[in-house]
Amino acid sequence: MLERAFIGAVEDEEEMVFRTGRWDFRVQRILRDDSRYDAFPVESRAKRRFYNVGAGSFRHDYWTNIDFATPYYRRAQRHRFLNYDLTSLRPLPIDSGGAEIVYSSHTIEHVPDAAAANLLCEAHRVLKAGGVCRVTAPDAALHVESWRRGDRSSFGHFSWYSWGGRWRTHFKVPPDQAPLEQLLLYQLATPCAWIAKHSTHSFPDAEITDTFAAKPVARACERFGKLCVFRPEAPGDHINWWTYEKLISFFADAGFRGAYRSAPGQSASAPLRDTLLFDNTHPQLSLYVEAIKT
């Protein structure tokens, strides 16, 4: 048995029901979506053999959260989780061949290729036959196309930071005043955008434009991505880029056969079709890849 070290207290569900209306809603959601788990063994539900990697504030009675303990995400990490550093390249703290689902949403863009490759290899190891691995991330090709069209609304999720001075936490200027080229680079390779508060490089807009105009998406993204490294003090930086082609190739290298392009709420596994719990981070700008272990 692999050693599992949880961080955080286990909440008492009855206390949660009466604490606030918000938690009352969440508990009711857990009860109402129970039918999605009817096809799974009772033991898998009791032992939480459904794993959310990079879980943040996610919570469900049948799921085990796996996350990186850091002050950066302290407010989001409200529920107990297995502390795991993807960049360590160690095995997941999960026994082989017993997991029903391994899910990860908007996590692999924060770690280098080696960490993403190791995660998928580990997902293949821990899943039982017929188990599902599903990964979502920002769609680099879609962001580049939005930039080419001058579509600033595609980067509108950054606008939240412009309100009330929140931008100072992550940016050097309010995002709604930043050049579109810098917003693109912030999305694909945060340390390379001069607008990033902790940028390590400073590329002028003209160089960004020339690079993406002259090169295919993958080569242009890699031009900047290769300069990015994971920094524990800035785990929220995007240091990696993903397209469907790249992610599917990583699935294949990990041992999955027949990984396929998916869409929000479209899954072979019933629990993952609940979009109130899954696939709800910027779905209009994300990619979705899923595979079934054979």
Image (cartoon, rainbow, N blue to C red):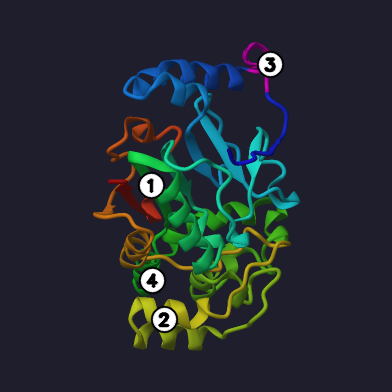
Q: Quadrant of residue 252?
A: bottom left
Q: Which residue is mark 4?
A: 144
SS class, disc 2:
helix
Mark 2 touches mark 1? (CB < 8 Å): no
- Residue 232 visible in the current orientation: yes
Q: Residue at x 61, y 17 (%)?
A: 21
Residues in magenta? Answer: 11-20
Please state which amino acid type lies under the numbered disc 3: Arg
Q: Are marks 4 and 2 in contact (CB under 8 Å)?
A: yes
| Marked residue nearer the N-terminal end (4 or 2) | 4
Tell whether 277 sits left or right of 195: left
Amino acid type for the residue under numbered disc 2: Ala
Question: Looking at the picture, how far across and down is residue 67, in whole percent?
Answer: 61, 46
**Alpha carbons under labels 1 and 4: distance apart:** 24 Å
Q: Which residue in the protein does label 1 denote?
A: 134
Label 3 to label 4: alpha-carbon separation: 44 Å
Q: How far is the residue under mark 4 from the one under mark 2?
A: 10 Å
Hey, what amino acid is under mark 1?
Arg
Residue 276: which quarter of the image?
Answer: top left
